[in-house]
Image (cartoon, coloured by chain):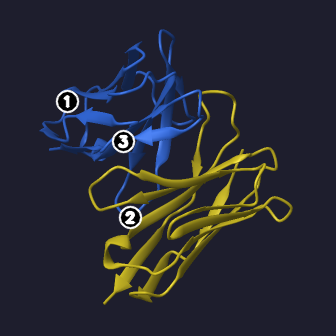
Amino acid sequence: GENVEQHPSTLSVQEGDSAVIKCTYSDSASNYFPWYKQELGKGPQLIIDIRSNVGEKKDQRIAVTLNKTAKHFSLHITETQPEDSAVYFCAASMLTGGGNKLTFGTGTQLKVEL
Amino acid sequence: GAVVSQHPSRVICKSGTSVKIECRSLDFQATTMFWYRQFPKQSLMLMATSNEGSKATYEQGVEKDKFLINHASLTLSTLTVTSAHPEDSSFYICSAGQSHPDTQYFGPGTRLTVL
């Protein structure tokens, strides 16, 4: 089955700096890679996703890159703000037109310091 | 759009009792719903996948007779933890999936504490 590794487990940055979180996956058949943000005591919130037919996607301060050959993908947050502090999870799955099982990474605790 | 709700948000029960958790997709029809559990400072672990009108598919190691899943409609799935024990205490999260686009949206989670 799919295995997703995520690094770093914790990340502390100064407000305004950029943050990068990296994930690798094992199953070359995976073609969908979402990123979720989870605040304490809440469910994960989808923040951005990328499909394997593109290499990069950007949404305001958030971007995701995908390298299919190397089987890794990364989340980039620019101009970080205190409200970006949360746990971020990457995930991978194979789209099947419904019912795609997600395999999650182990999570990154991001802390944005003033 | 794509809002998923869970009820209750928090529940405390005694050992041996059963607890039902509801998951609803509020503004879309979910072809598939998923149930996860999450222990403190850990990742989400998939428990089971359910499709409307059919039996749930459980992940290896998850007892189907203990964690009963019913997916009665395209907007509602329920998870019943039967004969709960303290080790069942956890954060239970559901998600609902759409066919187009093929995306999962998560509920806010249910904190279960078994005394």
Task: Residue at 14% x, 44% y: name it.
Answer: B115
Q: Nearer the viewer, residue A37 or B68?
A: A37
Q: Earlier in the sequence, mark 3 or mark 2?
A: 2
Amino acid, disc 2: Lys
Amino acid, disc 3: Ile
Disc 1 secondary structure class: loop
Q: Chain of mark 3?
A: B
Q: CA distance from mark 3 to mark 1?
A: 22 Å
Task: Residue at 69% x, 30% y: name it.
Answer: A96
Disc 2 secondary structure class: loop
Disc number for residue A76: none
x, y percent for residue B42: 43, 60
| Image: A46 above or below B36 | below
x, y percent for residue A90: 56, 58
Q: Which of the two discs, 3 and 2, sits closer to the camera?
A: 3
Q: Name the residue furthest right.
A: A69
From the image, tell me which residue sits under label 1. Answer: B16
Q: Chain of mark 2?
A: B
Amino acid, disc 1: Gly
From the image, tell me which residue sits under label 2. Answer: B41
Is B41 displayed left or right of B104 in the figure? Answer: left
From the image, tell me which residue sits under label 3. Answer: B93
Chain letter for the part of the structure drawn in yellow: A
Is B11 displayed left or right of A108 in the figure? Answer: left
Q: Chain of mark 1?
A: B
> Would you identify the image quadrant in which residue B60 lies?
top right
Q: Which of the two discs, 3 and 1, sits closer to the camera?
A: 3
